[in-house]
Image (tube, rainbow, N blue to C red):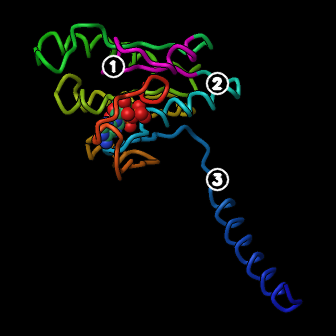
Amino acid sequence: MTIQSNDRYQQRQQKIKQQVDSRVAAATEDRGLLIICTGNGKGKSTAAFGTVTRAVGHGQKAAVTQFIKGTWECGERNLLSRNGVEFQVMATGFTWDTQDKESDTLAAQEVWQHSKRMLSDPSLDLVVLDEITYMITYGYIVLNELIDALQQRPSGQTVIITGRGCHRNLIEMADTVTEMRSVKHAFEHGLQARKGIDW
Ligand code: ATP
Ligand code: MG
């Protein structure tokens, strides 16, 4: 690199540093976040459990409710529940096949009661509501009840919501929203779901 181009490089880096520094200085608010991972692409629950791992690694306290695949095996649940993370999962009785509204609502409501307890527990740094978006879509949990519980939660608590088709009111109130967009998925071209990769 010539002396002149090195100067230019340093000037440019200096400018970038100033911009980043001023943005860091402007971020003064310190409170728990509402994070939403939605969209049709793979990675929503993985991202939520990754964040639980991150929090637990710092000695923080996290809890998870799962609204669909409770009876399914889940590698993260096996690992994290051994490391002090409470999991509450939907009981059997919930199936997409029967669409028995009454028993589905009961199953969802049971886990929702646990979620509400977690959302009012100031000792929890992080609460994950995995796949809760479908409960809203199907009317098993009332949207305004979820919004109220989120608004009234302890100020230091972060909540992560996952699931496709997240309601726009939740998107609006969230601090961070990531939409996973599927470019392609192995399942579409005949590859089976894999243990350790898909669950
Ligand atoms: P993951 O749990 O792998 O992070 P996810 O939470 O984003 O996935 P879900 O909608 O909860 O996705 O679906 C869970 C299961 O469906 C996983 O086994 C995942 O691999 C699979 N899956 C995710 N996206 C797609 C897709 N676009 N097409 C087919 N299967 C998918
Ligand atoms: Mg998921």
- Which of the two labelled residues, at mark 2 and mark 3, occupies the earlier sequence position? 3
Q: CA distance from mark 2 to mark 1?
A: 23 Å
The magenta span reads: 62-81
| Extreme residue toward the right, this view | 3
Check disc 2 and report its element: helix, strand or loop.
helix
- Tell me the number on the disc at residue 28: 3
- Tell me the number on the disc at residue 56: 2
Q: Tell me the residue that label 1 is attached to.
A: 69
The answer to whether residue 19 is above or below residue 175 is below
Q: Amino acid at mark 3?
A: Thr
Residue 18, horizontal then vertical, whole percent: 73, 72
Is disc 2 in contact with disc 1, using a CB cutoff of under 8 Å?
no
Q: Amino acid at mark 1?
A: Lys
* Neighbour tally class for label 2: few under 14, some 14-19, many 20 plus, Cα within 10 Å: some
Residue 117, horizontal then vertical, whole percent: 43, 15
Q: Quadrant of residue 149?
A: top left
